[in-house]
Amino acid sequence: MKVILLRFGELFLKGKNRKLFEKKLIENIKTKLSDEEFVFHATSGRYIISGYKPETEEGIVQKLQTVFGLHSLCLANGVDAQEEIIRQEVIKVELKNKSFKVEVKRADKTFPIRSMDYAAKLGGLLLDLNPQASVNLYHPDVTIYVDIRENKKAYIYYNFVRCQGGLPLGTAGKALLLLSGGIDSPVAGYLMSKRGLELEALHFHSYPYTSELAKEKVIALGNKISQYCGKIKLHVISFTRVQEEIHMHCAEEYMITIMRRIMMRIAERLCEKNGLGAIVTGESLGQVASQTMQSMTVTGGVVKKTPVFRPCIAMDKEEIMEIANKIDTYETSILPYEDCCTVFLPKYPVIKPTIEKAEREEARLDIDELVDFALSTEEIIEIG
Ligand code: ATP
Ligand code: MG
């Protein structure tokens, strides 16, 4: 019988919380596989998925590979724990010229041969059948596990598939992702969800300066990351009036600084209203003028009670792009629709803004009224 053995990662470190983490992880696995036919067992610190049709295995594996908190999985064959049957199974492994070792675990002590002796015996058998292969007990290319369980079943496996790692979604609370149409913010959302955060998202558009397609693109990006991050409530807010007012009244070099300060104020208001515990952005140090240390001090400075998480802060663009490719957002992110940040873009944005100057520029605006007005344009789209 084919089965999938699941291994979880850091969950082991969670002490008393472990039960809670496990419960959430199991719930997330079952939700993810809700369209599949399968049986789930949790036995002595191990999860086993069985009872699925062989042709659905690939799809199930792909889905499990998007579940945070799973470290890896292996495709195993479950057989009756009898020497001859196990032998038949083990000799199927094709080793060619690889190095290998056999590792036997014997939870069922009534099994007649001791683990070490049995591993040596099976290893010898494999060597006879694969004369090009060699034994390497320390750094083998392939490790063949024979796991003899108390229920008189033996699981034989050697195929490990890496999963996401991280912590189960929903064990760290909920945060607000500032989601633009760019490359960085979907990656930022994915990375924070990997640490267990559920997400809502906030997108600013500048219709009619930005097109309806730009919004569609953000929804498409939300859909892509929801494969990993779960359902996302997307708040879409019009930034047009804010931008027009800034454009009319404030110094051009401070436009982006002030725009971003207003974005952050709106984000914090949404967090308060919706019980969200943090703001997540895709900022990366030094990437553009608005992402210098001084710029982030001035823009982050308006956020009073909410932490701002910037998981891409230390990453090169190339590293961010690598993750974007892995989670399949890259091709969508590079579609050429205008983002609201590119509308009215000043030629020479300030690189080292100060809070004093930003406040002087903002004194020409009715900030509270602009924030309230922007919030009144909110449209909510459920994604995933
Ligand atoms: P990205 O690739 O994520 O768009 P970027 O390198 O283009 O980032 P900026 O445009 O300066 O950088 O934006 C920095 C961060 O501010 C973004 O990562 C995102 O979190 C947020 N942001 C920018 N524009 C918007 C928008 N229109 N709606 C919501 N959030 C935005
Ligand atoms: Mg952008």
Image: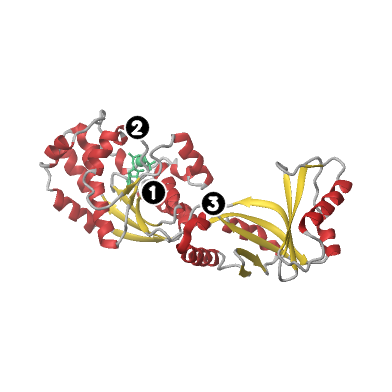
47 left or right of 168? right
Distance of label 2 from label 3 (alpha carbons): 29 Å
| Snapshot quadrant of residue 44 | bottom right
Residue at image x 46%, y 63%? 16
Mark 2 or mark 1: whose residue is earlier in sequence: 1
The spot of residue 73 in percent (x, y) is 63, 56
Mark 3 residue type: Gln
Residue type, numbered disc 2? Gly
Residue 171 % position (x, y): 43, 60
The percent position of residue 126, horizontal first and vertical second, equals 84, 49
Left or right: residue 127 compared with residue 248: right
The one of 378 and 107 positioned closer to us in this rendering: 107
Tag 3 residue: 164
The quarter of the picture showing ligand 1:
top left
Q: Quadrant of residue 359?
A: top left
* Farthest top residue in view: 348
Which secondary structure lies at badge 3? Answer: loop
The residue that disc 2 covers is 286
Tell me which corner region of the image, top left, top right, bottom left or bottom right, holds residue 315. Answer: top left
Q: Earlier in the sequence, mark 2 or mark 3?
A: 3
Pair 3/1: label in front: 3
Residues at badges 2 and 1 in contact (C-beta under 8 Å)?
A: no
> What is the crowding at mark 2: few (fewer than 14 residues within 10 Å), some, or many (at least 20)?
some
The residue under the point 21% across, 31% down is 253
Helix or strand or loop: what does disc 2 sit on? loop
Q: Which residue is mark 1?
A: 213
Spot occupied by residue 149 in the image (x, y as percentages of width and height): 71, 66
* Horizontal relation, residue 212 to residue 101: left or right: left
- Tell which residue pokes out farthest to the right in this image: 128
147, 131: nearer the viewer: 147
Figure check: 329 above or below 52: above
Residue 246 or 257: which is nearer the viewer? 257
